[in-house]
């Protein structure tokens, strides 16, 4: 949420959507390369940690693998800055920050995975929150207070650079990532360094499809911002990317929910895979994910005007608000897909995850190429929804054959249909009029309670 609140700071203190577009594109590249540097090792870690024959070797083997590959990447990237800059279009003045962030973040992948596996959510959360607090605080200092302080105090004048806002944002992230690594560094002193080549080979085979899936996901989620700049071109491309990126952030409520849910439930899926009641449990979990996700969809759409005015104070960005319901729904579909994907993870058929994700990436790229020239960021939003919707359906379709799970499709379909229909009425027909949208939200909540009250009472009793 602190990162989300930074949208207010960035859209207010950066020099309009063009500058914010540059920030958006740089972050998009960071995420793409984050996936490459993780190469599926995190999910492989969880998979093999629950196998007795490898349990004592998984942590050290995966940690050594990530450390070596990260250091190799860091050295090559620093030496090849000119080539990287020319290939992907990042100016060298920003590229150094991107490389540092990537290296620092990669070195905490396995330490954080270890905390999740040990079920230590408090330490995990404290360190993650510390990272965001440092990043947010430095953003506020550099963008809001430093310009004024530089006029009054000589020392601050020495560190203030005019028109350096984008660099300050990424400097803040470098510092936050460095502190996070420092806090997680004891992990590297507490493990026994044993590298098992056979285990590493199995982890790489298992993780390669995850890498492909992750790369496809990064393309689905972030490459449209890059394509907007490339295809629209010049400052207009940066403007559209910035406006789209800012309004895209209003879907963060859904993203936060889906991400927190996935990170908590993924270890659970693996640890309960041998339970005879696992399919029923997975079905119930997915149903309640849809319920809460549907509520978030309608709630954010209902109060979209309030969020727009308070979170994106610069009206130059508001033209892209049209994408908000579409992106919310797309992220809900993505969250459902992650729940449905349990079947190929626990049956070691991760290649299906790669196939499905690649299909999504192809849809994303294809529709962006077709729609951006005519519809700009609206075309990108439609492409994102089409990709995630297709991935959701494909995962459900193949899962029925390889690991049948008794999903209550009638209820899930009902909740999705109602939430989508009410959101369309609220946003596109009645322009988020509170006299219409709030009653629609209340009606949906009443329907949910009437349909789920027995299960809710049972859960509360437990």
Image (cartoon, grey):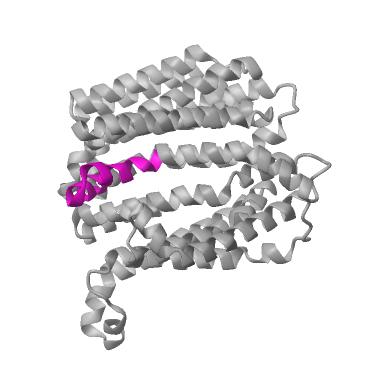
Q: Where is residue 98 in the image (x, y as percent from the top left)?
A: 42, 60
Q: Which residue is drawn at 69% across and 58% down?
A: 64
What residue is shown at x 29% (from left), y 84% (from top)?
A: 158
- Name the residue rendered at 64%, 53% in the picture: 110
Query: In this image, 103 relative to 29: left or right?
Result: right
Q: Quadrant of residue 16?
A: bottom left
Furthest toward the bottom, the residue is 154
In the rendered image, residue 42, in percent from the top left (x then y), is placed at: 62, 46
Q: Which of 147 and 456 is in front in this view?
A: 147
447 above or below 45? above
Left or right, 264 with reference to 1: right
* Nearer the observer, 345 or 201: 201
Q: Give the range drawn in magenta.
A: 221-242
Q: Which of 221 and 404 is in front in this view?
A: 221
Query: Is residue 399 toward the left or the right of residue 187 in the image?
Result: left
Total numbered labels placed on residues in the image: 0
Q: Position of residue 157 (x, y in %)?
A: 26, 83
Up-down relation of residue 450 to residue 377 (above or below): above
Q: Is residue 233 covered in magenta? A: yes
Residue 203 seen anywhere in this rendered image of the structure: yes
Q: Position of residue 387 (x, y in %)?
A: 40, 28
What secondary structure do most residues of the magenta stretch adopt? helix
The answer to whether any part of residue 261 appears in the image is no
Q: Tell which residue pokes out farthest to the top in this image.
A: 410
Picture quarter with the C terminus:
top right
- Magenta residue check for 345: no
Q: Residue at image x 53%, y 36%?
A: 213
Q: Determine the residue located farthest toward the left in the rendered image.
A: 315
Could you say which quadrant of the image residue 193 lies in?
Answer: bottom right
């Amino acid at each position: 949420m602190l990162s989300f609140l930074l949208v207010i700071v960035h859209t207010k203190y950066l020099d309009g959507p063009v500058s914010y577009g540059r920030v958006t594109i740089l972050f998009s590249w960071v995420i793409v390369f984050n996936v490459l540097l993780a190469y599926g090792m995190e999910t492989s870690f969880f998979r093999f940690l629950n196998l007795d024959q490898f349990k004592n070797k998984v942590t050290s083997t995966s940690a050594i693998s990530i450390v070596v590959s990260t250091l190799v990447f860091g050295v090559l990237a620093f030496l090849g800055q000119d080539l990287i800059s020319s290939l992907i279009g990042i100016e060298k003045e920003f590229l150094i920050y991107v490389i540092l962030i990537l290296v620092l973040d990669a070195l905490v992948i396995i330490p954080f995975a270890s905390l999740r596996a040990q079920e230590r959510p408090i330490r995990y959360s404290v360190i993650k929150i510390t990272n965001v607090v440092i990043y947010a605080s430095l953003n506020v200092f550099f963008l809001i207070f430093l310009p004024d302080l530089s006029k009054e105090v000589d020392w601050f004048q020495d560190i203030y650079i005019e028109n350096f806002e984008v660099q300050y944002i990424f400097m803040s992230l470098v510092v936050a990532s460095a502190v996070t690594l420092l806090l997680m560094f004891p992990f590297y002193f507490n493990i026994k360094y044993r590298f098992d080549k056979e285990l590493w080979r199995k982890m790489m085979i298992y993780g390669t499809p995850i890498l492909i899936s992750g790369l496809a996901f990064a393309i689905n989620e972030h490459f449209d911002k890059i394509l907007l700049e490339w295809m629209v071109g010049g400052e207009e491309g940066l403007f559209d990317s910035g406006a789209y990126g800012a309004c895209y952030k209003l879907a963060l409520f859904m993203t936060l929910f889906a991400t927190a849910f996935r990170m908590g439930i993924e270890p659970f899926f693996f640890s309960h895979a041998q339970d005879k009641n696992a399919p029923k449990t997975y079905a119930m979990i997915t149903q309640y994910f849809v319920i809460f996700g549907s509520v978030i969809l309608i709630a954010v759409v209902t109060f979209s005007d309030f969020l727009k005015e308070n979170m994106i104070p610069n009206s130059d960005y508001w033209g892209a608000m049209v994408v908000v319901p579409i992106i919310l729904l797309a992220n809900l579909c993505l969250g459902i897909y992650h729940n449905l994907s349990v079947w190929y993870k626990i049956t070691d058929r991760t290649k299906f995850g790669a196939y499905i994700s690649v299909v999504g990436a192809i849809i994303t790229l294809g529709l962006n190429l077709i729609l951006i020239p005519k519809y700009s960021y609206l075309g990108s939003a439609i492409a994102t929804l089409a990709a995630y919707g297709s991935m959701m359906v494909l995962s459900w379709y193949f899962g029925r054959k390889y690991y049948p799970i008794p999903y209550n499709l009638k209820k899930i379909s009902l909740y999705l249909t109602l939430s989508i229909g009410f959101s369309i009425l609220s946003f596109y027909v009645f322009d988020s009029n509170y006299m219409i949208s709030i009653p629609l939200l209340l009606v949906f909540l009443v329907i949910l309670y009437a349909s789920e009250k027995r299960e809710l009472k049972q859960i509360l009793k437990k």
